Image (cartoon, rainbow, N blue to C red):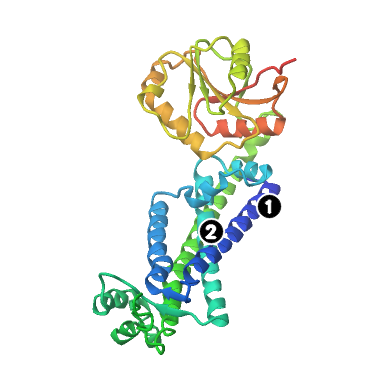
Amino acid sequence: MPTNTHQQDLKQLSVGLGLLGVLCGFLAAYGVIAGDAEGRVNLLYLLLLFAFLPIAGLLFSVLLLLKGGGKGLAGWILEFPLWPRHMTLSLAQLGPAGSRKLWLFYQTQILAVAFSAGCLLLYLLLLLGSDITFVWRSTLLQADDLLPALSVISLPWSFWPEAQASLALLEQTQDFRLDPQAATQSGVGLWWQYILAAQLTYNLIPRSVMLLIARQKYRRQLRALETTLSNNAPSTARRPPGNDLTLADLSTSVSLPYTLLDWAGTPADLQQQVQQQLGEASEVVSIGPLPRGSDEQLPNNISVVLLVKSWEPPLAELADRLESIASTTESTDKALAGSNNSKVILPLDWNDNGLQQPTSAHLDEWRRFAATLPDWQVLQLEASS
């Protein structure tokens, strides 16, 4: 459960994503509405940005919602090293699964609504401050070919007659490069209501509804977590000091033989220092978010040591990766029940002199992460002298 400080960091991340969404909406809308050298704006490009792409994104969000949430676009953006470390550490407090995925799904909706608002705001500003010339061009389509599709698109606002497409309006605003005067001047500005209705119907309103749904689901999960924690409070209070239920066990050794899994991209000399303390690894395997195939399956009867950077927050991708590796050795785990083979996460910190002890805060972050994974512990080495 995130603390108040962590909640403040998460709110700042939400604000940052919202501002980023507005800025991207401004740039995307301006890139389309600016038009050509004569200031003519292609109606079909506007519909692509304000109707078709939002519908595709909305369907993808609905799919993620039905599947229980996913990191979405916000998750990818937050992985870029542009955010303060304390904010990304606060994101790690949400845990590697449920609450993290729902929070990222919630942030994706914030990003999408902010993008929609940015597009709409720039559109209204340009309507007020400039004379937008709406035309359409197509080599294959004629006015009577395009009218049925535009009529279907405008069905949700059929009560708004001024925002409907018509054959006469399409004929008036069809533009030909060889005849730039073909579009009738009386009709080039009449599409603004149609485009406005399309933005509201297919972009801003449905995204706002999706945002409310995501917010409600996330808050419901937080309330359920609070209830679980309150129900466990009495038993927690009776535990001896220092035995935090949310922290995995801390180990100082690993059973031999072992495989060294490198998630951190650790330099070779540091890998050697690790092996000097733990013993020589039977195999060193570099792993990433995506599986590499059967060559990454772990051998039988062997321990696992996972190298991570202590200062980087644990992410859901790592938890999913470990689960996929564990699934390939499930039968092995059953066969090894009661053996001394172990699975440990080794957070590494280093400087020019070699390995050094991770900070207590970073170590606790990884212990909380390991506590969410079955049978994983955290390993702590001695610092280099």
Horizontal side of residue 337 vs 236, given as left or right: left
Residue 355 versus residue 310 in the image, above or below: above
Q: Earlier in the sequence, mark 2 or mark 1?
A: 1
Residue at the location (39% across, 74% down)? Answer: 43
Query: Percent x, y for residue 356?
Result: 71, 22
Query: Percent x, y for residue 140?
Result: 25, 69
Query: Percent x, y for residue 347?
Result: 62, 26
Give residue 240's mark: none
Viewer-proximal residue among 241 and 168: 168
**Image quadrant containing the C terminus:** top right
Residue 17 versus residue 171 in the image, above or below: above
Residue corresponding to mark 1: 8
Query: Percent x, y for residue 179?
Result: 34, 80
Horizontal side of residue 301 vs 274, given as left or right: left
**How many callouts does the rendering have?**
2
**Quarter of the image holding residue 135?**
bottom left
Viewer-proximal residue among 119 and 321: 119
Residue found farthest to the right: 385
Residue 268 versus residue 90 in the image, above or below: above
**Image quadrant containing the N terminus:** top right
